[in-house]
Amino acid sequence: MLFVAAGSPATVFALVPLATAARNAGHDVFVAATEEMTPVVVGAGLPAVSLTRRTMREYMFTGDDGARLTLPADPAERMRFGGHGFGRLASDGLENLRALSDVWRPDIVVGGTLSFAAGLLARQLGVPCVRHAWDMGEPLEMDLGAAERLAPELSRLGLTELPEPDLWVHICPPSLLAPGAAAGEVMRFVPTGRQRLTEPWMYTRPARPRVCVTAGSRASREQDLGLLDGLVAQVGSLDVELVIAAPDELAPALTEGRPQVRAGWLPLGTVLPTCDVLVHAGGGQTALTALHAGVPQLVLPNMPKLVPHSRRLTESGVALTLLPGEDAPDAVVGACRELLSTPAYRERSQEVAAEMAALPGPAEVLEVIEDLQAG
């Protein structure tokens, strides 16, 4: 079984539970990702192969002609722009996947939501293809943008649009799936991520309410340090214990002058069950990890594609969402205060956690996938 991820840790983490179940069941497994992400694959105990030496950021902001690209201001155009970037990644990665299949031919290809090379390779080889959701779903505009960029590759396969997978695997609980989501298997979400040595405070609930703040695994000095620093100042004004989930290199700047704040890479699956609120930038894997822990969320989506599922979280009663322009410091503090003081948010979050726990696990869904190859 060949699993195809992309160029960020979340695209790998989402596939790890099913890929591990397949390997544990005795299947030969490879996980393909950008070379930058292969250490994440290896760190999860899985064999890695390189899709490309280029980074996801290069594919997003460099055109086929080498020209530098600028992110569109219009939200819909921005999502198509993202689809073009994933299309460029698929086009380049497909060459390496074809070379791999010449000597190691997969019987089944499992591609992440926007890993479009998976479907193209499976069609060329004549083997089943599974499209595996990375989180709570991606907007249709991403697929449309990818199809535009991949038109030559599709034409060579006799196609005019992206090939339909033989099976969808969702990891979002049914009550939060997007309207119109493709039919398929819904698998229990398993929190996965780079681990570290756990310390007692991580799995011990403190006397005061604990709030976790994060901007995701790709946070950097250039991109998210200011956002995180502002959130720390805002949330820190409340009578809470504050923990910040961020790359270790950001920890010194975030804790300077704040000896009571803990910051660094945290195993969220361990820490979140001890928290009362999670404040985050809308990442789907982060949101699902909070749902799994039954923790209310304050969502500040920093990309247009994150807005639809952020709204579904709010409509479901597990979160509050502040869109860009609504996220003034007073609004952030007020939303945190509401989440901390209103039991209904935690009660609803725990209901969703129970819904997730009752779903079929990776080993059970693997049996359905095995039947595709047998058929």
Image: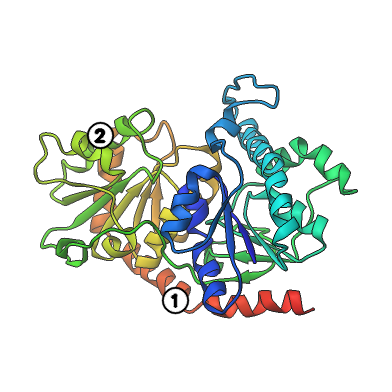
Amino acid at pointer 2: Asp
Q: Earlier in the sequence, mark 2 or mark 1?
A: 2
Within-10-Å neighbours for mark 2: few <14, some 14–19, many 20+:
some
Dot 1 lies on which element? helix
**Spot occupied by residue 353 in the image (x, y as percentages of width and height):** 41, 70
Residue placed at 45% from the left, 57% from the top?
Answer: 42
Which residue is more in the foreground, 326 or 371?
Answer: 371
Hey, which residue is sitting farthest top in the picture? 67
**367 left or right of 262 in image:** right
Within-10-Å neighbours for mark 1: few <14, some 14–19, many 20+:
some
Display colour scheme: rainbow
User: What is the spatial separation of the Cα atoms under label 2 and label 1, in whole angstroms?
Assistant: 34 Å
**56 left or right of 126 in image:** left
**356 left or right of 27 in image:** left
Amino acid at pointer 1: Ala
Q: Quadrant of residue 91?
A: top right
Residue that numbered label 2 is attached to: 229
